[in-house]
Amino acid sequence: MSIYRFVSLTPYQYDYVNFIFPKFKDIQYKWEHDYWATSYKELIQNIKNSYSKEEINNLKIANCVADDTLLYYLYRKLGKKFIYKNKNEKQANHVIIINRATLDILDKPNIKGLVNKNGTVYVDDIEKLVRTEGVKSTCNKQYPGEDVVVVSRNGVKLSSLRKLDNDENK
């Protein structure tokens, strides 16, 4: 069973989880999966195969995590020169999702004093911060929408291109 799971996850076999969950798909939102972001390459190739050049030009892509690897593939394969982020993120019509846990720490009144204006946190305050209600989140929760291109193995999504539910896209 271990060998089967290893082979069926390849090249993402580092996403191995023991057999407390015999059905691999049952672990979808229990852990981070593609924490090395190696599925970006496959995802970008799938986007290129799924959309015309004109449609790709109209994609305004944000990224749920700070990762320069994604920008490398977006530029090399799709000709995209930047990712919408920070203040410009609301202009995006799509987002690259990877099941990564993140901390939503900016402009939160319940963590006042733990985070300064530019998002800096002292090491001594990290545990308090992470345990504060509403701070820890995943990309899936932060960006509502429909996954239009997906990279998955054994029923677990590793990464996806999600069309965002926002006023501009309706």
Image: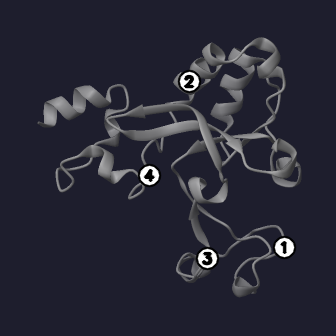
Q: Nearer the viewer, residue 105 or 158?
A: 158
Element class at badge 2 = helix
Q: Position of residue 111 (x, y in %)?
A: 70, 83
Residue picked out by circle 3: 134
Q: Does 97 sit left or right of 112 as displayed?
A: left
Q: Quadrant of the N terminus?
A: top left
Instruction: Give the residue type at disc 1.
Output: Lys
Residue picked out by circle 4: 32
> Of tags 1 and 4, which is closer to the observer?
4
**CA neighbours of label 2 inside 10 A, class few (<14), some (14 to 19), many (20+):** some
Check contact, mark 4 vs mark 2: CB within 8 A: no
Residue placed farthest to the left in the image?
1
Of pointers 1 and 2, the one earlier in the residue sequence: 2
> Of tags 1 and 3, which is closer to the observer?
3
Residue picked out by circle 2: 41
Distance from disc 3 to disc 4, alpha carbons, whole Å, reads 18 Å
